[in-house]
Amino acid sequence: MAIDSDTTVAATQHEGEIRVEAVTKRFGDVTAVDDVSFTIPGGEFFSMLGPSGCGKTTTLRMIAGFESPDAGRIVLQGGDVTNVPPPKRNVNMVFQSYGLFPHMSVADNVAFGPKIRKLGRSDIDERVREVIHTVRLEGMEDRRPGQLSGGQQQRVALARALVNRPAALLLDEPLGALDLKLRKEMQLELKDLQQRTGTTFVYVTHDQEEAMTMSDRIAVMHGGVVEQLATPRELYQRPTSAFVAGFIGTSNLLTLRVDRREAGYLVMDLGGGQRILAPDNGVASPAAQITVRPEWIKLAAGEVGTDAATDASHVSGTVAEVVYLGSVTQLIVDLPTGERLAVHRLNDSVGAEDPRTGDRVTIHWAADHSYVIDGSADVVGGGTATESTVSAAVRD
Amino acid sequence: MASATEVLETPLPSRTGSSARGAFGILFTPVTLLLILFLAPMLLMVKVSFEAAPPLDTAFSLDNYPSVLTNSLNLQIAIRTVFIATTAMAVMLVVGIPLAYYMVFKAGRLELVILLALVLADELAPIVKVYAWQVILGREGIVNWLIPGPPVSWLIFSQFAVILTLGATYITYTTIPIYAAMKAIDPTVFESATDLGAGWWVQARRILIPLAAPGIFIALILVYVPMLTDFVTSDIVGGTNSYMMGQRVRDLILQDVNWGAGSALNFIMLVLTGVFALVAYRLAKLNQIETS
């Protein structure tokens, strides 16, 4: 009895929990995943985000059991499954191309897993009915996948995985094949589904907006390692690397030459009252790399005045580019440091005039809005990084 | 979603009208030639099947069909022919389905090599191939030379030899349609089936074979029907216990000079194989699945 209740407690403690421990995977000479570790608590919507080739799909496939790690362990609900084949792992995968069985009806597709597991007929029927209701596919049971729209096929794939009541659902870019509008709808629906079922979702995507919309936490991956693992808000406001800053949203990277330290700030003096400030991170280095979000930067006409507030950065510059994006106008401003900065101006009133190319403007932002990227002392010559980031932002 | 349904429901542009007349113009010559060269001999055969035996040449007679159908020897040969052809077909499917699967999903760069090998194997003249098997299986042949002890008698001039040789002759036409059908399968279905707990046997039975079914039925049409009427193979590597329907018809006409009986038997075979081909074709069409 005592043992029984103990195991129950252990199982509930780890329900839906996934631990990836120091996992490495190589394909020939290429290290696809390099010593990656993280823990996903049960019931979390967890995303792995990164450009193609960053190791996110390989990591997911190792959790699913389709790839086996060269080093490290995969622990599901407290048990080591590193060498357990996929069907015995109590996780299910939703594939990018769905992998629906085209010769079977929707109901047969969904019932496939339970039938393999030899559940009773009434139990299977009950589960299929329930999950078809959950994904809102009532009335579609007898159709073949070829007779469904992309979004409906997506839901069949979800139902087919969820019907097995997996400890975790692994989703490999499941919305990649859908058009933008449907993708946005499905994002909200997936999030809703995850909350209703309480299932751990592990989601792989290269679309930062998609990851931001749905995830409780995001692991940003790059070159086989996790660059940063944090909540969407934290990733956006406090990126810990230049890569994360550039990958999540539009971002400006600037190199701040530390001319002096003053009242808890790093100060770069540019003459004529112009200065760039950032919170002092306590690292004694002659330069720091900072990131500033374009919407945190305010715009004024003319040159920096002498009455400028002392707790904010103030720089004069020349407008190099004006791009109207609808809700905002993006301005690219040339700074006296030779760097370029993207500034977003909210279009909150009709008829407001945007500055024109060549105009002299002053930009300012609160010192606390300059975020010093850790380890940035190693990265000098941020000017080029800024330009590439800005041009990437313009393409977005 | 609504827009997708609308697109699906928009009727396709009509294919009748001027394009149909164009098709008629293009097809007129080949269809006419086919009718003359293909249908005319067949009609002649039907006519001959209603003619009396040699002494009463060309007189109309209904005797051929009852006599052919009631001849117990014909029935015996028919059963044997179906047995040989069915066994050979089964052997070819057992080899051809895994081979096609290997080519499509596992072979990688070898895929084209195997495809080319299959095509080249078929380029060889059939008679040359059959004689090659005689060299391999004969009493003094390669296999008996390799196996120690006295020669194995059933290797040649037997049903075994006929089945093996037929299999080797038609393996190209069995494998390629199945290969083509499997090419249309999204390999993710196997991964998702594995994910859902299906082992290889369940995947083969419930996913691979149903999805490859159109190709399998096409293979049946291309291979099973000609095997039923084959006479060259059994002539060269077969013996008295593998005497087949094709040989029977040929011998009725060329040896017994009984054109009426030979034609009647041939016509019955034509109808039966035609029915078989139609059924297989219908099944192939039915199994064609929208894979979009």
Image: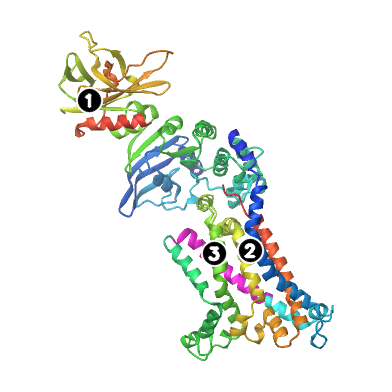
Q: Secondary structure at mark 2?
A: helix
Q: Provide the residue designation for mark 3.
A: B176
User: Quadrant where the C terminus of chain A lies?
Assistant: top left
- Magenta stretch containing residue B94, yes or no? yes
Picture quadrant where residue A134 is located: top right
Q: Are marks 2 and 3 in contact (CB under 8 Å)?
A: no
Does residue B159 appear anywhere in the picture? no
Q: Which mark is residue B30?
A: 2
Say left or right for B208 vs A173: right
Q: Provide the residue designation for mark 1.
A: A281
Q: Main secondary structure of the magenta part?
A: helix
Does residue A340 appear anywhere in the picture? yes
Which residue is drawn at the image coordinates 54% and 35% (left, top)?
A197
Task: Give the amino acid type for the residue marked by disc 1 in the picture.
Answer: Asn
Q: Residues within 10 Å of mark 3 (few under 14, many from 20)?
A: many
Q: Secondary structure at mark 3?
A: helix
